Image (cartoon, rainbow, N blue to C red):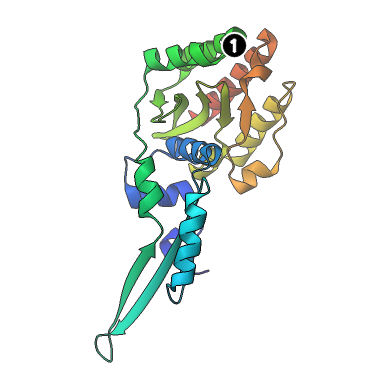
Amino acid sequence: EKAPPSYRGKALDEIMKDIVGDDFSDEDFRIRIGQNLRDGRIRLIIAVDELIEQLRATVTFLNSHSNFDILLLQVTDFEESKTKKVLVPMLFGYATKSAERGSRETKLWNEDSFLDDTKGRCEPKIADTVIKLYEFTKDNADEISWGKGATYGSFTFRKTSHGILVSIFAITSTGSGWVCFGELVGKGVKEELIQTLRIKLNEIPGINIPEDVIKLGKFPPIAVEALMKADNLNNFQDAVLALCQEIEKV
């Protein structure tokens, strides 16, 4: 209810794109969130009325003995005039450990770097399936979107719907991936088409996507292991192609 009217009813990735601009990639955004959670890169920001010394000491101690950051935010207000108030924020707890970690560099992946990383990380059968999914994407997608992850690569299968590129699925060089139901919903793809995709994917052993992912606009994970058998991979590809044929219709 407190969100600005222009943001109401929008998914988080849509709001981020409005703020950041066209350089924002929702796929990279989700990849980085997942990587940060796995690495324990979490920041808890606590708003306080006053930065007392005991609280500073507690935060300093916790930050020096944990993998996450606790930050204290104090906002002091001053009345510049009877009609104007000035807010002055002060953040404590950020500099020490965050400076030691440094900023995470990003890397724009391409075909060669992605395939090399996949072969180095995954078991041969999984790597072979990832490569087949990539070849399928090369042959059928309107665009391949490469990730910018610092630690592992990713690509996204994108298709044009009414002149707008829509992400359908993404695969990483670690042998994982997800289906972009959230973007399909956000880009206006008909719900019955998305439901058909979900039902067809659920016919593949090892894949079980709940019905609420569409209503909630989620990006459910898929394991490449479930697609290693030829029949399963073919069924996955057929489901994607069937959706592509429908969303290309004007």
Asked if residue 135 lies left or right of residue 103, the reply is: right
Instruction: Between residue 32 and residue 194, name the one nearer to us.
Output: 32
| Image location of residue 166, percent across then percent down | 46, 33
The quadrant holding residue 144 is top left
The residue shown at (48%, 53%) is 63
In the image as oriented, which residue stretches furthest toward the bottom? 82
The residue shown at (48%, 68%) is 55
Instruction: Between residue 116 and residue 99, name the one nearer to us.
Output: 99
The residue shown at (65%, 16%) is 227
Callout 1: helix, strand or loop? loop
Q: Is residue 136 visible?
A: no
| Image location of residue 44, percent across then percent down | 50, 57
The quadrant holding residue 89 is bottom left
Instruction: Between residue 58 and residue 222, name the one nearer to us.
Output: 58
| Image location of residue 87, percent across then percent down | 32, 75
| Image location of residue 103, percent across then percent down | 34, 40
Assess disc 1: are there few (<14), some (14-19) or many (≥20) residues with their C-alpha within 10 Å of its C-alpha. Answer: few
Count of labels in the image: 1
Reply above or below: 193 against 85: above
Q: Is residue 28 visible?
A: yes
List the residue tagged with mark 1. Answer: 123
In the image as oriented, which residue stretches furthest toward the left? 80
The amino acid on which the numbered mark 1 sits, given as a three-letter code, is: Glu
